[in-house]
């Protein structure tokens, strides 16, 4: 049995949730799972390890809607995915507005949540 060492539980993202780089307004990939402290992104563009990014995503609709969540994130690690041109990327959140943190917590605690 594998022991879990993560500080915050990660909720699986069952929908196709695109992640937008707010500096370029370009989709960089899609969410795989999210916690209060970070996310696993399946990237479809090259990203720089140990770099800082500003991302936008929406857990309940299009990424450009009023309920989108914006985060400052630090790329901690990358690993090649099975699909060509895709990379598993692990991010730690470094900035998140309080009202958006509340929105994220509500999504994480929803009854239909499935955790990894």
Image (tube, rainbow, N blue to C red):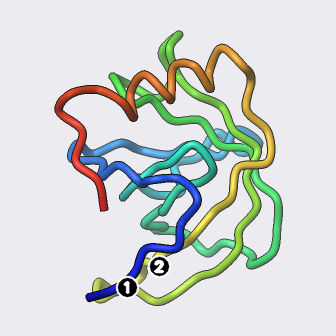
Q: What's the distance in space between the residues labelled 1 and 2, CA to CA?
A: 5 Å
Q: Quadrant of residue 69?
A: top right
Q: Quadrant of residue 109?
A: top left
Front residue (pair 113, 46) = 113
Instruction: Locate residue 10 relative to residue 82 in the image: left or right.
Output: right
Front residue (pair 98, 88) = 98
Q: Secondary structure at mark 1?
A: loop
What mark, if any, has residue 81 been given in the picture?
1
Residue 37 rendering spot, x and y as whole percentages: 63, 49
Instruction: Locate residue 51 relative to residue 112 in the image: left or right.
Output: right
Q: Is 11 drawn above or below residue 88 in the view shown? A: above
Residue at 30 percent of width and 52 percent of height: 12
Q: Is 94 drawn above or below residue 3 in the view shown? A: above
Q: Is 80 drawn above or below residue 11 in the view shown? A: below
Residue at 66 percent of width and 31 percent of height: 70
The residue at which mark 2 appears reads as 87
């Amino acid at each position: 049995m594998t022991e879990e060492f993560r500080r915050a539980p990660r909720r699986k993202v069952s929908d196709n949730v695109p992640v937008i780089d707010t500096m370029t307004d370009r989709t960089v990939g899609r969410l795989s799972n999210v916690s209060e402290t970070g996310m696993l992104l399946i990237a479809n563009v090259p990203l720089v390890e140990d770099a800082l990014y500003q991302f936008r995503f929406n857990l309940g609709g299009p990424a450009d809607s009023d309920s989108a969540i914006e985060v400052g994130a630090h790329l901690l690690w990358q690993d090649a995915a099975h699909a060509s041109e895709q990379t598993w990327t692990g991010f730690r959140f470094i900035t998140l507005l309080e009202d958006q943190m509340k929105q994220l917590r509500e999504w994480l605690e929803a009854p239909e949540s499935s955790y990894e």
